[in-house]
Image: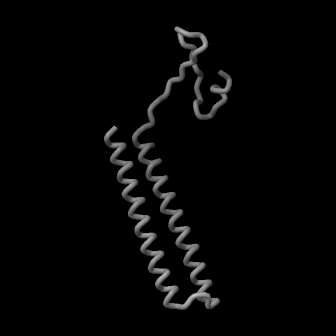
Amino acid sequence: MSAVQASPDFNQQPQRSPDNDLELLLRVELDRREDLVRRVKAVAQGWRDGIRHDRTRHDKLLKEWRRTGAVLPDVGRRAEKEVQKLQDKKMKEIDAEEVRALRQLDRK
């Protein structure tokens, strides 16, 4: 019982079951829809930020390779276009997943 009381996840006092003294009952409240929507949007935004961070890292690497002559200029441009295509594709997937999750919340 003390583990449940000390846990920040529960933050409540468990009650003993009237039928069984060894059983503890916890009341679980449903999350508000607004909180769930905010959480879904925050997760999707985190995914987008991760993609943008990766893109920045790749751009810096390509710039360094061009500066040192490790890649030819046309290969660098082709690589930039390919990275842009991959980023656009991934962003569309993230947007679709966010819309799917929000629709699923509307069903409940």
**Color encoding of the figure:** one colour
The answer to whether residue 58 is above or below residue 9 is: below
**Residue 60: x and y, percent?**
59, 78
The answer to whether residue 36 is above or below residue 66 is: above
Residue 108 located left or right of residue 72:
left
**Residue 79: x and y, percent?**
49, 81
**Residue 80: x and y, percent?**
48, 80
Question: 102 or 89: which is nearer to us?
Answer: 89
**Residue at point 34%, 37% (across, down):** 108
Which residue, as the protein is rendered here, is positioned at the far top? Answer: 19
Residue 21's quadrant in the figure? Answer: top right
**Residue at point 39%, 59% (across, down):** 95
Question: 78 or 98: which is nearer to us?
Answer: 78
**Residue at point 63%, 26% (across, down):** 4
Residue 25 located left or right of residue 32:
right
Residue 96's quadrant in the figure? Answer: bottom left
**Residue at point 61%, 85% (across, down):** 65
**Residue 35: x and y, percent?**
45, 43
Residue 46 located left or right of residue 37:
right
The answer to whether residue 105 is above or below residue 88 is: above
Number of numbered discs overlaid on the protein picture = 0
Which residue, as the protein is rendered here, is positioned at the far left? Answer: 107
Residue 1's quadrant in the figure? Answer: top right
Question: 14 or 60: which is nearer to us?
Answer: 60
